[in-house]
Amino acid sequence: MTRDRTHPGGQRSWPSFLPAAVVLAAVVIDVLIPLGTNVFPLLAAAPVLAVPVHSLAGTIATGAAALAVGVVLRHASGGDLFSSAHAVPFTSITVLTVLAALLNRVMARDRQRLKDAREVAEAVQRAVLPTPPERVGPLDVAVRYRAAAREAAIGGDLYAILSAPHSVRLMIADVRGKGLNAVRTVNGLLGTFHEVAVHLPGLPEVVGRLEERMQRLNAEEEGGAESFATAVVVDVPADGGELSVVNLGHPAPLLLHRGRVRPLDPSVPSLPLGLGDLGGAQAPVDRYPLPPGAVLLLFTDGVVEARDRRGVFYDPVPFLSRPLPAEPGAVLDVLLADLVRHTGGALEDDAALLAVTRRRGASEGG
C-alpha cells in the first residue's frame, strides 16, 4: 500500500533562496545606484529571512556572508570601516545574526516536536489500517491513501478486505471527523467487520452488525455527540462472475472494463451507518456482473469532492473511460496522478482508494 502523506520532496522551494537573493539585491543596488544609498538594512534582513528556511549553520553562514558583503561594499566606496558611524550597521548585522541563530534553534525544536507527533500519528494510522496483502483469494488487491495534510495524518477513512469461506468481502468507509475519536470509530468498525464478515452468510447481516456497533460507539461518546459513517460493503464470490454491493450513503463504486466505466449506483439510497435509528428501510443488496479482467474501484469522498482552482469537483469517470492497465495498483496510480493534476496538489480531505481485479489464471473455484 502507498501512503502519500506529503507533497513531493527532495526539491528546495523558492523561499530557501530568498536570503541569498536579498544579499544579491543589496550588491546590485549599491553598484547601480549613486553614492549615498544605504543597503545595510537589506543585508541585516538576510539572516532573519534564513531562520525558517535554513538550518542553524545556514543561518549563521547567511549572517556571515551579509557581514562580509557589507565590509566589501564599504571598502569599495572608500569609507572608513572603523569609524563610529560605520560600526553601527556592522553591529546591527552581527546582533541580528545572533538573534536569528537563537530563533532558529527554538523553531528547530518545535519542528522536531511536530515531526515526532506526526510520526506517532502515522504509526497509529498504520496500526489501525495495516497494509492488506496484494492477493486475497482469487483477487489482486491495491490500496492507496493520500492525506490532505501532513498534520492530519489520522483521519476517518478506512478499508478492509478479507477472505470468507465462499467469497472475498471488502469494505470502504468514511467516518465523520478526524483525530482520536475518528480513529476510535474506525477501529471499532474494522474490528466488527473482521469479526462478522467471515462468519455471517449474507451482507445484510454484516451491515446489521456494523450498524449495531456504530450505535454503541455513539452511545459511549461523551457529551451525547453522535457520529456516522458512509460505507460500501462488497461480496465477490470465488466461483462466479457476479458481485453483491450494499451502499450506505457512500460514493458509488466504479467498474472499469475495456475502456468503459460503470458507476454501481444503489437501486435505493440508504442512510449511513449510525443513522439507522432514524427509521430508514434496510439497505438493499444490489448485484452486478463482474466480467473477466474488470477492475472494481472503491474510494472515499476525498476523491470526488476534490476541487480545482475554479471550484470544479473532480469526476474520475472521464479520465477512467479509456484503456488502462489491468493491474489495480497501476489504475490507482494513474488516477491519483490525474487527481493531483486537477487540484494542483492540494486536497481538502483525505482520500482512500481500494481496487481489486480477478487474478489472471485464478480458477473459478477460487
Image (cartoon, rainbow, N blue to C red):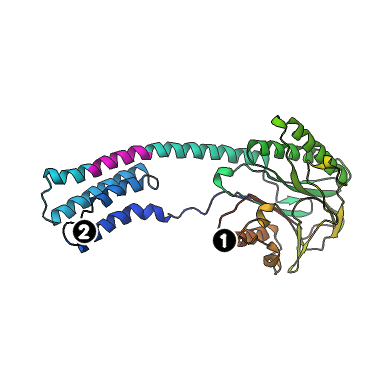
| Left or right of 35 in this view: 95 | right
What percent of the width, then of the height, locates residue 362? 80, 57
- Distance Cα–Cα, label 2 vs label 1: 41 Å
| Left or right of 292 in this view: 90 | left
Q: Name the residue nearer the viewer: 28 or 131.
A: 28
Judged by its main secondary structure, the magenta piece is helix
Dot 2 and dot 1 residues touching (CB under 8 Å)? no
| Left or right of 132 in this view: 72 | left
What percent of the width, then of the height, locates residue 133? 70, 48
Which is nearer the N-term, disc 2 or disc 1?
A: 2
- The answer to whether residue 198 is visible is no
User: Which residue range is magenta in the image?
Assistant: 92-104
Q: Name the residue nearer the viewer: 342 or 135.
A: 342
Residue at image location 73% in from the left, 51% down from the top: 135
Within-10-Å neighbours for mark 2: few <14, some 14–19, many 20+: some
Q: Name the residue nearer the viewer: 69 or 134.
A: 69
What percent of the width, then of the height, locates residue 298? 73, 54
The amino acid type, in three-letter code, at marker 1 is: Arg
Secondary structure beneath dot 2 equals helix
Within-10-Å neighbours for mark 1: few <14, some 14–19, many 20+: few
Q: Does residue 77 show up magenta in the picture?
A: no
Q: Which residue is mark 1?
A: 309
Q: Which residue is mark 2?
A: 30
- The answer to whether residue 20 is visible is yes
